[in-house]
Image (spheres, grey):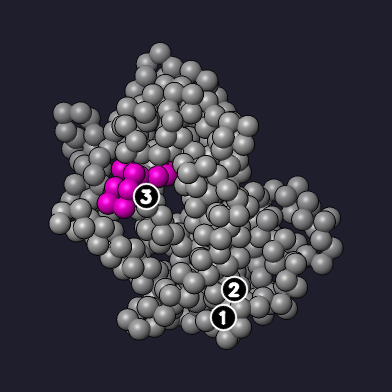
Amino acid sequence: MTDVTGASADVLHTLFQSDQGGHEQVVLCQDRASGLKAVIALHSTALGPALGGTRFYPYATEAEAVADALNLARGMSYKNAMAGLDHGGGKAVIIGDPERDKTEELLLAYGRMVASLGGRYVTACDVGTYVADMDVVARECRWTTGRSPENGGAGDSSVLTAFGVYQGMRASAQHLWGDPSLRAKRVGIAGVGKVGHHLVEHLVAEGAEVFVTDVREEAVRRITERHRDVLAVRDTEALIRVEGLDIYAPCALGGALNDATVPVLTAKVVCGAANNQLAHPGVEKDLADRGILYAPDYVVNAGGVIQVADELHGFDFERCKAKASKIYDTTLAIFARAKEDGIPPAAAADRIAEQRMADAAAARTR
């Protein structure tokens, strides 16, 4: 069943009625001259202008693109709230193959679409878009972050993303073992790309025993040639079964924690940079039932969004790093709330984020 616009009924239900909905605004964008087809979803502006990246991806259907934009925007509301930012959550997706369809004309057209929202949405990089792309978008839209330093931006945000995950690991160690030190802890990292390889540096410097895997052999080789003590593991299936593993860090694709992986995890802590690590509702309870401490992904990987948000105020790396260091305290507060309420940490993080958004919305109506 579809409505007169051709949008599938299940997408409209998600937008207007389901628990995953509640979005303030969804904009369908098209520029025939450049071939642009995009969806901009604003989940909440209770805390301020919505902030979130632009994903460029070859979705199989338009309905799939809309659904992804809705889910990602909602996730950004929670991430920004827990990061203490004065920003709501938004996300944009451009439908197409970035290797084939991305052009300067398309990015400029996209910039005009974002600009038409008058500052309600601030965009940045995501899968399929890069710093150079944001430089182009910024030519048409001043509400663009993730730009190059040469164009007034902060550049690559992976450095602070990794730093935030490291702080989340330290908080997890403090909560579970009574000491934030990761020295001699066995840490397995799945995915050593932009974020993962920076995380390795923090862990090696502290004296952790590090195991890595990646689908790209050259990414692993770059790590092991630099750090002879880091051990390469065949694949993620082998990594999650490493004997005596203390911490597992998913830093690649989402859905890493699922019905197949959770039962065989040897780690006592999961804390990584990947988005949407929980494959479906209920996985967080499965982890808790196994005694595995889960540091919510959108809390510990917020260093990047902290960095791009700072661009709007004139980027200062040390100021950003100080904000990202607070991920340690935030993660500890989530664990304490989870224990107090008798719920998994993921649910506790959601409650704290929802309360902050609700308080901000109520303050506006006073």
- Please rate how many residues cluster around mark 1, counting C-alpha atoms within 10 Å: few if below 14, some from 14 to 19, many from 20: some
Judging depth in this view, the residue of 179 and 8 nearest the camera is 179
Does dot 2 land on a helix, a strand or a loop?
helix
Q: Which amino acid does the dot numbered 2 rest on?
A: Arg
Judge from the rendering whether residue 325 lies leftward or rightward of residue 9; answer left or right. Answer: right
Find residue 81 and report its horizontal and vertical position in percent.
Answer: 37, 58
- Please rate how many residues cluster around mark 3, counting C-alpha atoms within 10 Å: few if below 14, some from 14 to 19, many from 20: many
Which is nearer the N-term, disc 3 or disc 1? 3
Find residue 84 and report its horizontal and vertical position in percent.
Answer: 41, 59
**Which residues, given as a range, are shown in magenta?**
41-54
Residue located farthest toward the top when viewing the structure as drawn: 33
Find residue 271 and report its horizontal and vertical position in percent.
Answer: 55, 67
Name the image quarter holding the C terminus.
bottom left
Residue located farthest toward the bottom when viewing the structure as drawn: 178
Could one spot residue 168 in this view of the protein?
yes
Question: Pointer 1 and pointer 2: residues touching (CB < 8 Å)?
Answer: yes
Residue ID at (63%, 52%): 159
Residue ID at (56%, 55%): 319
Q: List the residue tagged with mark 1.
A: 174
Q: List the residue tagged with mark 2.
A: 170
Q: Main secondary structure of the magenta part?
A: strand
Q: Is residue 339 above or below residue 139?
A: below
Q: Which amino acid does the dot numbered 1 rest on?
A: Gln
Query: CA gap, disc 1 to disc 2?
Result: 6 Å
Query: CA gap, disc 3 to disc 1?
Result: 29 Å
Q: Which amino acid does the dot numbered 3 rest on?
A: His
Residue ID at (20%, 53%): 364
Does dot 3 land on a helix, a strand or a loop?
loop
Q: List the residue tagged with mark 3.
A: 87
